[in-house]
Amino acid sequence: HWIHYHMAWLARTFRVPSDWPPGNRLFLHFESVAGDCQVWVNERKVGVHFDKYLPFDLDITDAVRRDGLNTLRVGVRSMRLFDKRDARYGKMIAPYPNGSNTDRLAGIWQDVSLLSLPAVRVQSLFVKPWLDRDTLEVDVTVRNDTPDARPLRVTVESRAWINEAGTGPLDAPIPKWRLGDRTLAFPDSALAAPPHGTATCTIAVTVDKRLAPWTPDTPNLHALLVSLHADGLPIDTACQRYGWRQFTLRGRDLLLNGAPIKLRGDIIHPFGAYTFSRRFVWAWYTMIKAMHGNAVRPHAQIYPRAYLELADEMGLCVLDETAVFGSSVRSNFAEPAFWTRYADHFKGLIERDRNHPSVFGWSFGNEMFAVFRLNAVSPEDEKRWYSQLTDIGLAARRHDPTRPWISCDGDGDLFGALPVWSKHYGHNVPPLAADTRGIDKPLMVGENGGTYYARPAELAPFAGERAFLDYAGRNEALAVDLYQNILALAPQLAYFSASETVWFGLEQLPFGHTDFARLPSLADGVFFEGVSPEGKFGMQIERLPPYSGTLNPGFDPALPLYRPLALFEAQRAAQDPRGPQPCRWDRRLPTPERPQAPPPVIDSVSYAGGPALKQRLASWGVALHAPAERFLVLDGGTLPSDAVRRAAAILAQGGTVLILAIDPSLDTARLSSLLPQPVALTARTATALERGDDAHPWAAPFSLADLYFAEEERDADRCVMRCGLAGPFVTSGRVALTASRTDWSLFNRRAEEEKVGALFCYEHLVKPSGAALVTHAAGHGGTLALCTLDTAVDTPARRAFWRRLFTHMGVRTHAGGTTGSTRARREHDLLLDGPPAP
């Protein structure tokens, strides 16, 4: 419903459990509500919230009936209702952190809980492991909701946190743990909590080797138990998991526990509700570990806590990022409310996640340069807004003094202001050394490669025409490029990540779909039992469609956890702890040269058919003369009554007859009368071709780049054939050209969440015959050819193709002819076209 509506009221009833202590305060905890939110209990407004990703708590004690039915109403207005386009910079629209694929998210999308808490309680804990001082420190904040001041005694102890989760895809993602023996006891601390207020104390203890440290290889975890005592009695206990570890910076090095560490990670956009499930996170982290990675950047928004919890447990270092996604170019820097909401958003992220040992740093934005560049911001505004960005980022030091890593991903170091330099690069090895000359701080390449944007021609230098062949061939080209980049860049970097190996380096899986003779329908996919059950925590998805993801942590028992492609395998080889290992993609893949066509010997052809095709032949530079005894072109749509006689005469002299039949509705009986065997037309279209018989003299000189039309500017111009050929004529003949096994128009300039799945679906689909140019020996050494390639489209690429094809058939073409259409220029789109030229 949220697809069509931008605001709604959500309502339900609830009862307070009768065994809850009557003196406790009652709270509603919202893990995340996307939008401008109002909360009402029993017709009383109890609170508001404006964000899409952060948790919040509302005290509803005074509005609740403890002995009866209560009504909860939550009103939500989509963030999009608050869009405000700037008058000067028209692409600046969103005065709030908008995220990437959750930009349009609205409503309650994470858990809501009813809590009973003591009136005097531990409100928050901030654990600060200072390994360089051998000191474990904790800030304890206490809330007192009574009218009287409360003198308190605070006790703290640490216990081992022992993970007892399973190891397989079905049970490993399910939390299972226990606390072990006590490892540390802190000195007691006295604290006075003021009435209706808070108080904070800091308690510290020397560790003296009593805690096992946390590292990616040994993710040891511990738990602090913090108890409050009043009048000699315990009144509240809070538990906080943590790790004994410390990240620091030294020159260009990131240090973990005093030793340099190189981070190798991955990113992903939130491409569906299933990506927020704990199972998905476990599967992704398992994949990262398998390619010798040790880091992750949950990208372009604040993700559910499972991302941090599993990173703690599995041993991955997390660069935690806000939802200020500059790549969307929507952030409205000109609106004062943007900066207020941005600061609150970043602070909320830090306060939510700063106790996670896996978090090594804070990324307060992504590719903010795009907002400046694509809005053509004035120098004055640019200076002012970059200063505000810097202030937002460096505020992290106030909220978390334990992590010096602060970066704005893809934006360098904001002209020297940040402690970390971070850039994104596309395909080809970039000039990192030149870009970072004189910079003595940790360097990061957070996104690398042409995974999401590069088209076949851009990738052909790495794998030749394989880049045009299909998705696997494209992936080989990406793998070659990535391997080279890891070898060239990674030694200089504290952090390196390709662009979404989990999405582009694995196959899209056909969840719940096995009949590849048809397209998937809404009846296909994996359907989950117990849709949205009450009282069950976490994201509860209803259906997982085919080709909507690459990871299978038990969703479909017929499929593996993942199916790796070349990109994954190359990254695994390049990141091997022993050093880069040899693999198929450790060098550019050779592509054999195509043979040269023999010089043409026919100066002109005969033609029989309608005026449109005749005009097109002229535009291709084909000279028409009647009679021409060696080559006859027949228009299959307007065959003359004497077509059979004329064809037989040419073939009897060892000549060539080419029948062009582009209309799927043609009378195949009439067409077959010209042929030695019957032919049928199939419902097959294509935007590119392949060589059928690789040795066919008409096809052999073509490379796949010559047969690629998926980037013609008008959609209608991309289709190079509207029907294929089948039947005995095809099976007994030689197929010179056939429809491509893939369709790059489904991928190029499409959104990331749709393009890969669409291509896999197309490639898996059992399609009718795509034979497009078939030849038969006929007469006395003659050649009879039938072709369904579209002759109606007139573009430079099509004219070049037809000129070459006639040359391969032995016909000399001439310069001149009509110019046809030209390709229009379009505005560069960062998300679809990749990094703009510098």
Image (cartoon, rainbow, N blue to C red):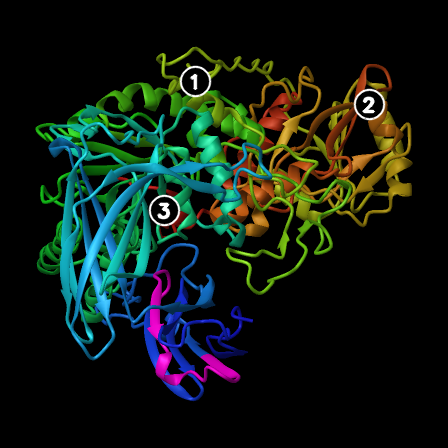
How busy is the neighbourhood of tag 1: few (under 14 within 10 Å), some, or many (20 plus)? many
Q: Quadrant of residue 614?
A: top right
Compare marks 3 and 2 and give the one earlier in the sequence. Answer: 3
Q: What range is drawn magenta here? A: 51-73
Whole-angstrom CA distance, mark 3 to mark 2, is 53 Å
Tell me which amino acid carries mark 1: Ala
Tell me which amino acid carries mark 2: Gly
Q: Residue at x 39, y 17 (%)?
A: 576
From this view, report whether residue 78 is shown above or below residue 397. Answer: below
Compare marks 1 and 2 and give the one earlier in the sequence. Answer: 1
Q: How far from the left and from the top, in percent, is residue 222? A: 32, 39
Q: At numbered mark 1, what does the secondary structure look like: helix, strand or loop?
A: helix
Name the mark on residue 299.
3
Name the mark on residue 523.
none
Name the mark on residue 733.
2
Tell me which amino acid carries mark 3: His
Q: How far from the left and from the top, in percent, is residue 597? A: 59, 16
Q: Toward the viewer: 621 or 57? A: 57
Whether residue 821 is visible = no
Are the residues tagged 3 and 2 within 8 Å (C-beta)? no
Compare marks 1 and 3 and give the one earlier in the sequence. Answer: 3
Q: Residue at x 68, y 15 (%)?
A: 695
Q: Toward the viewer: 729 or 235? A: 235
